Amino acid sequence: MAVRLRLKRMGKKKQPVYKLVAADARSPRDGKFIEAIGLYNPKSDPAVVEINQDRALYWLGVGAQPTDTVRNLLSAEGVLLKHNLKSKKVSEEKFASEVEDWQKKQEAKKLTLAGKKEAKKKSAEKDLNKTNDAAEVKGTASGETE
């Protein structure tokens, strides 16, 4: 039996929430599954990803193949890094240092993304202020001519 790690859609219309499940590859998307190992909510800001890493590592270890989206989610959570390090049988010290380095890189990436969001927000506020000032100037100019 070929096992796939994939998403099962739940939630209301236009408000999807997904369960990350281990399922037989032949079963339908929202059909029978073997085990639920996580949750993914793309509509919240930021998107919520909760994964039981022990179970995900177990399923990857026994040969379950993740779909493209699940692979991206597992990679973002660091599960694929841990799986690759375990499959290479690296020492515990190297494993811990690699995971720690990865976590530091993720924190730095979050900080740069937060900085970019803040910069976009400030530039949008400046643009809004410029358009408001231009409208006020135009309004006072048209008020004088009447």
Image (cartoon, rainbow, N blue to C red):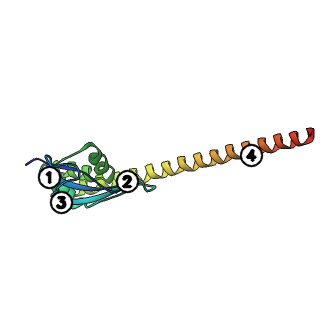
Q: Choose mark 1 or mark 2, whichever is in front.
A: 2
Residue shown at 68% from the left, 43% from the top: 127
Q: Choose mark 1 or mark 4, whichever is in front.
A: 4
Q: Residues within 10 Å of mark 1 (few under 14, many from 20)?
A: some
In-front residue for pair 10/23: 10
Q: Which residue is mark 3?
A: 35
- The image shows residue 66 at horizontal and vertical percentages of 21, 47
Q: CA distance from mark 1 to mark 3?
A: 15 Å
In-front residue for pair 146/21: 146
The three-letter amino acid code for the residue at tag 1 is Gly
Query: Do labels 4 and 2 touch, CB within 8 Å?
Result: no
Q: Which residue is mark 2?
A: 13
Which numbered dot is residue 136?
none
Above or below for 68 versus 97: above
Q: Which residue is mark 1?
A: 61
Q: CA distance from mark 4 to mark 2?
A: 38 Å
Query: Do labels 1 and 3 touch, CB within 8 Å?
Result: no
The kind of secondary structure element at disc 4 is helix
Q: Earlier in the sequence, mark 1 or mark 2?
A: 2
Q: Which residue is mark 4?
A: 132
Q: Earlier in the sequence, mark 1 or mark 4?
A: 1
Work out which quarter of the rendered image holds the C terminus and state it.
Answer: top right
